[in-house]
Image: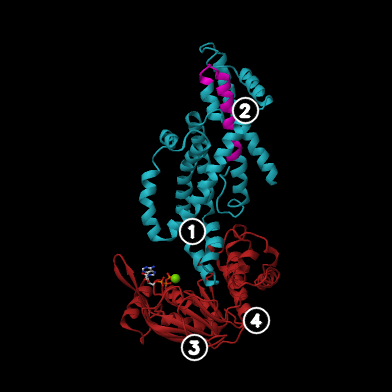
Amino acid sequence: MLPIEIRDVTLTYDTPGGKVPGVKDVSFNIDASEFLCIVGPSGCGKSTLLNMIAGFLAPASGEIRIGGKAVTGHGMDRGVVFQDFAQLFPWRTALGNVSFGLEMKGVPKQERETIAREQLRLVKLEKFTGSFPHHLSGGMQQRVAIARALAYNPAVLLMDEPFAALDALTRDEMQRLLAEVWRETRKTVIYVTHNVAEAVYLADRVVVMTPHPGTVKAVIKIPLPRPRDPLSVEFVECQKELLRYLGHDANPSETEKSAVNGKLKSGA
Amino acid sequence: MTENGQTIRSLVRAAITLAAAAAVYEAAARSGYFAPALLPTLPIIAHTLFAMLADGSIIEHAAFTLYRVMFGFSLAVVVGLPLGILMARYRRIEHFCLPLVSALMPIPSFALVPLFMLWFGIGNLTTILIVFYAATFPMLFNTWSGVRSVNPIWLRAAGAMGADENSLFWKVIIPGASPFIITGMRQAFLRAWIAVVGAEMIAASDWGLGWVIFDAKEFLNTDIMLASLVVIGGIGFVFERVVFGSLERATVLRWGMTRTAKG
Ligand SMILES: Nc1ncnc2c1ncn2[C@@H]1O[C@H](COP(=O)(O)OP(=O)(O)OP(=O)(O)O)[C@@H](O)[C@H]1O
Ligand SMILES: [Mg+2]
């Protein structure tokens, strides 16, 4: 599994209304087989950053290296899971969707079906291999998307708020499942979320970003042993710490701006 | 419910509508307000129709018409589908083709019949080209819209999984645009079917349903005209409901990309 380095990455969007900064001077590293979460307020540039790592966008300056090699475009060393349920191909069954990457790789039909079935079993969907996406629930569709991203065995898994649109109960279940899948496959994972509890549940380390235009505010280690108990005191402590960095709580060591934010919040 | 059951039920519903329309016609024909020679009753039309079926003449005419339609329609798909995709994928092709399409599309195919007759003579070639002209634009235009509305997330996902330009084309863009492509085919067939009858009236000698109608005018054979119209409507109906209906059920409806009306 591959480590990732992100060095001074900046991206600016050109829009008809002028230049809009996406992210500014972002640097951090991810170890091989590490589970890294990126949290930050909406619009801070999390998706922009992930899209650059995926190779869909090129940074204006700075560099991203995966396993020592500079990223120049998308590649099969990375699997991507998007936030949108619509990412599955509606004209393919769950099995057909999961097989797609293997098909592109030129794996023979028999073999790719075996692998795809195995991946669907991993996300507990072995009974739905023949179903089309519109007959699956949102959570099931996201599980197919995860299986699809894992099937061609990329070293790195990039996920952009994959469970954000799910109800809380399903989301808990999906997080447990993802933690399990990660334990079994040991992929390097970058996982974008704005849900603090989710980050604490899943991550080895969490990158906290500042509001727009996003830079790295802090990188926080989650030292809890797995499997994690969201109701334990330590878990809640970690959550509180993250929230402090996000400026949801008044904190004397914070910048003036987020301290004001905190006051507004507690006053409301 | 089974697929077959659904087909049968939809045909039954259609039959009820048609029977109601036939009853209204029959009432008008028997009301005495119209000359029987101009508005023959349904039994007379049916009798003529059976006679034409029995001696095989109408079947031969219909075969000619169908041949022209299928030929022109297939050409339209072969040209319109790839061109529509190219227009949506490549800016320069779009810039080049769009003005031409916008200028040609509003010209009624019927208005071209005399010109095509001078260029290509009377017979199959002219009628096929008229059909082709009529059917190409709906095919092209719908495909173009369809490809432009393919969800970009599918392209990204496919790209991330290593799809090259060729796989992207066949395995993502075409199925992704399929609701529009099928609509394009439907409209193209309809236009083709309308155009062929018009073209045959003037530009085809001796064969084709359009020619039968035009020829019957000479002898005031309204029963033959109406019997031919029944055949024209019937074949159009079969294609619209059975051929394109099944195609839709086997693809976009099955995939949930298009939904049937509720209730
Ligand atoms: N395609 C685009 N064109 C122009 N500006 C964009 C585009 N995409 C994003 N931006 C800008 O870049 C900034 C970062 O956007 P991004 O989508 O990366 O945020 P995010 O952190 O993923 O937010 P969210 O949590 O809401 O998904 C935003 O402020 C937005 O204004
Ligand atoms: Mg985002």
Q: Nearer the viewer, mark 3 or mark 4?
A: 3
Instruction: Tell me which segment is drawn in magenta.
Output: B216-240
Q: Earlier in the sequence, mark 3 or mark 4?
A: 3
Supply the letter of whichever chain is red. A
Name the residue beneath numbered marker 1.
B150
* Placement of B172 over or under B218, stated as above or below: below
**Secondary structure character of the magenta stretch overall:** helix
Mark 3 → mark 4, Cα distance in angstroms: 25 Å
**Amino acid type at image mark 4:** Glu
Distance from Cα at disc 1 to Cα at disc 2: 44 Å
Q: Is residue A252 left or right of residue A198?
A: left
Which residue is disc 3 drawn over? A68
Tell which quarter ligand 2 is in: bottom left
Q: Are marks 2 and 4 in contact (CB under 8 Å)?
A: no
Secondary structure type for disc 1: loop
Q: Tell me where residue B114 sits by quadrant.
A: top left
Q: Which mark is residue A184?
A: 4
Q: Position of residue A17 (x, y in %)?
A: 29, 65
Specify whether disc 4 shares its chain with disc 1. no
Q: Chain of mark 2?
A: B
Find disc 2 in the rendering and name its residue: B58
Q: Is mark 4 within 8 Å of ligand 2?
A: no
